[in-house]
Each structure stands twice: as structure tokens, then as C-alpha cells.
């Protein structure tokens, strides 16, 4: 039986690359995307779009009913949270939306996994912005490095890091 993976933000570069890799390992991949009015949003998945083990699902990761149904029905082995509002500048324009997508949606996904599929492994994509854009130490950053976010985006990703 193939492993099942959910990947949110499937049309993004990192998510589409991960999907391609997991498909090469014979995973069933469930790619979550949100509806968009922008054309050619699936360019990053063009090479895997018709793969028989890729299943595209439209939905809002900030909608607990959608996420609960997704997790309870699929009971995925792995869940990759790659969907996010990723533009630092936009986080100053729309800080509430940034927190909703980057933090609250992570909590919704974690709660769905806890309630409906507790053996699912969860990955949440963080950002160097959680460290505040200051000079990187020679040793690099680790999970133990101090957070010092300086934007709503950095704060949202830092909060999601600690929730995870």
C-alpha cells in the first residue's frame, strides 16, 4: 500500500518539487490549492499534473471544516504545510490575513491531525524571518536560536514554529 501525503500550497515551487519527489517514491500525493483568479497558476506542476497518483484538492486551509474532513478521510502518513502568505511587504498591508493563513491555519491543521489522525507526521515550513533578518551567526541558525521577528510575516511564522 502506498503512503499518503498531503501537501498544501501545491502550486508553489517548494511544494511542487516535494510532490515530484514523493511521486517518484510511489506516494499518493494530495495537493491542496486555493482557488485563484490568476492564470497559469499550475506552471510548477506541469510535469506531474497528469500523474495518476497526484490528486488535486481545492480548499482553504484556514477553514476547519475543510481541514477536518480532509484529514479524517485521508488519514495521511505525512502532512506538509507549505501554503502561506509569503510576502513580507504584504504582511504589513494585511497583517490579520497573514496571521490567519500562517498561524491560525497551522493550528487548525495540527488540531485536525490530533483529533482524526494522530499518527500523521506534520511538517511546517518556517522562514529565516523568524530570526529578524539580522546577521546570520557563523554557526548558522538552529531550532534553539533566539527568535526576533521584525514583521507581521516573521511573527506569524515564529508563532507557527512554536505551535508545531
Image (cartoon, rainbow, N blue to C red):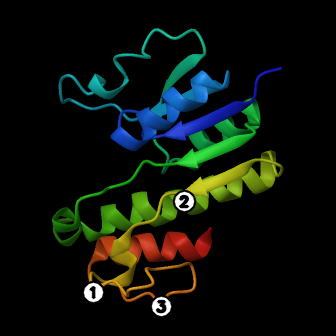
* Residue that numbered label 1 is attached to: 135
Q: Quadrant of residue 132?
A: bottom left
Q: Nearer the viewer, residue 114 or 161?
A: 161
Q: In this view, does 5 lie to the left or right of 48?
A: right
Badges 1 and 3: C-beta atoms under 8 Å apart?
Answer: no
Q: Can residue 25 be seen in this view?
A: yes
Q: Which residue is drawn at 59% across and 23% down?
A: 24
* Residue that numbered label 2 is attached to: 106
Q: Distance between the residues labelled 1 and 3?
A: 13 Å
- Image coordinates of residue 108 in percent, x first then y, are 59, 57
Query: In which quadrant is the C terminus drawn?
Result: bottom right
Q: Residue 146 carries which label?
A: 3
Q: In which quarter of the image is residue 129?
A: bottom left
Q: Which residue is drawn at 64% across and 44% down?
A: 79
SS class, disc 3: loop
Q: Which of marks 2 and 1 is nearer the N terminus?
A: 2
Amino acid at each position: 500500500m502506498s503512503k499518503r501525503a498531503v501537501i498544501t500550497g501545491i502550486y508553489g515551487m517548494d511544494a511542487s518539487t516535494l510532490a515530484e519527489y514523493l511521486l517518484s517514491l510511489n506516494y499518493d500525493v494530495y495537493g491542496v490549492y486555493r482557488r485563484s483568479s490568476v492564470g497559469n497558476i499550475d506552471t510548477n506542476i506541469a510535469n506531474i499534473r497528469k500523474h495518476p497518483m497526484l490528486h488535486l484538492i481545492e480548499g482553504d486551509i484556514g477553514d476547519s471544516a475543510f481541514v477536518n474532513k480532509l484529514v479524517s478521510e485521508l488519514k495521511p502518513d505525512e502532512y506538509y504545510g507549505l501554503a502561506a502568505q509569503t510576502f513580507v511587504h504584504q504582511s504589513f498591508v494585511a497583517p490579520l490575513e497573514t496571521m490567519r493563513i500562517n498561524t491560525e491555519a497551522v493550528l487548525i491543521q495540527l488540531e485536525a491531525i490530533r483529533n482524526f489522525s494522530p499518527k500523521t507526521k506534520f511538517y511546517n515550513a518556517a522562514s529565516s524571518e523568524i530570526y529578524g533578518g539580522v546577521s546570520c551567526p557563523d554557526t548558522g541558525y538552529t531550532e534553539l536560536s533566539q527568535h526576533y521577528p521584525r514583521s507581521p510575516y516573521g511573527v506569524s511564522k515564529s508563532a507557527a514554529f512554536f505551535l508545531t
